[in-house]
Amino acid sequence: MNTTKLRSKRVLASTAVVAALAVGGGVWATTASANDEVRGGDRDRVAEAAVEAAGGGTATDVETSDDRGEAYEVEVRREDGTEVDVTLDKDLKVVTKETDAPDAGTAAAPSGSPEADDRPLTPAEQASAEKAAVAAVPGSTVLDVDRGDRAGVAYEVEVRTTDNVEWNVDLDSAFAVVGKTAD
């Protein structure tokens, strides 16, 4: 066999392998990003399905889900302030739907009350909650910080470890860990 043809075949095969790895790596990087927000036309479709399931309102957060049987997690806020958390499967069928009490409109809502989770976090609260959660799960990266909506839980923090395990860390109002579970 001609050496030039053999060399040409090796180059083509090597190029194909590199291209396949690049495409696969790009797909992995896209799906493994710490920000699981759904964007563009997909976000519109998912948000519309969730708003319909919630009985109206506005989708305030649309994310992918890594839980079995779920593809999307959507927060919908109705006009009366009620929040509805809707999870959808890949066919946009409702898996779960949970309704939170409407926002009382007060900044003095106690931690653990349904109204407390609707107030935005201050930068100091955000930083303290992130620091406490990362200390509780060393080597992790913060994915999300929210106010708690259960008694005794002031903040709920989601983190991901380097081995891709997600943890839910519950903190009290002094940023002490009151619970930690692998997701």
Image: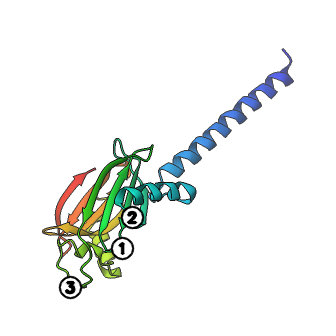
Which numbered disc, 1 or 2, marks the residue that appears first in the sequence? 2
Q: Is residue 64 left or right of residue 174?
A: right
Q: Amino acid at mark 1?
A: Glu
3D distance between C-alphas at marks 3 and 1: 21 Å
Question: Any mark on residue 56, and which?
Answer: 2
| Crowd rating for badge 2 (residues with CA inside 10 Å; few <14, some 14–19, many 20+) | some
In the rendered structure, are the residues bearing label 3 and label 1 in contact, judged by CB atoms less than 8 Å apart?
A: no
Mark count: 3
Q: How is the image coloured?
A: rainbow
Q: Secondary structure at mark 2?
A: loop
Q: Is residue 64 left or right of residue 169?
A: right
Image position of 178 with respect to 109: above or below: above
Q: Quadrant of residue 86?
A: bottom left
Q: Amino acid at mark 2?
A: Gly
What x and y, as percent, mark residue 70? 37, 46
Question: Any mark on residue 79, and which?
Answer: 1
Query: Which residue is at a point 29% across and 59% down the rendered structure image?
Result: 138
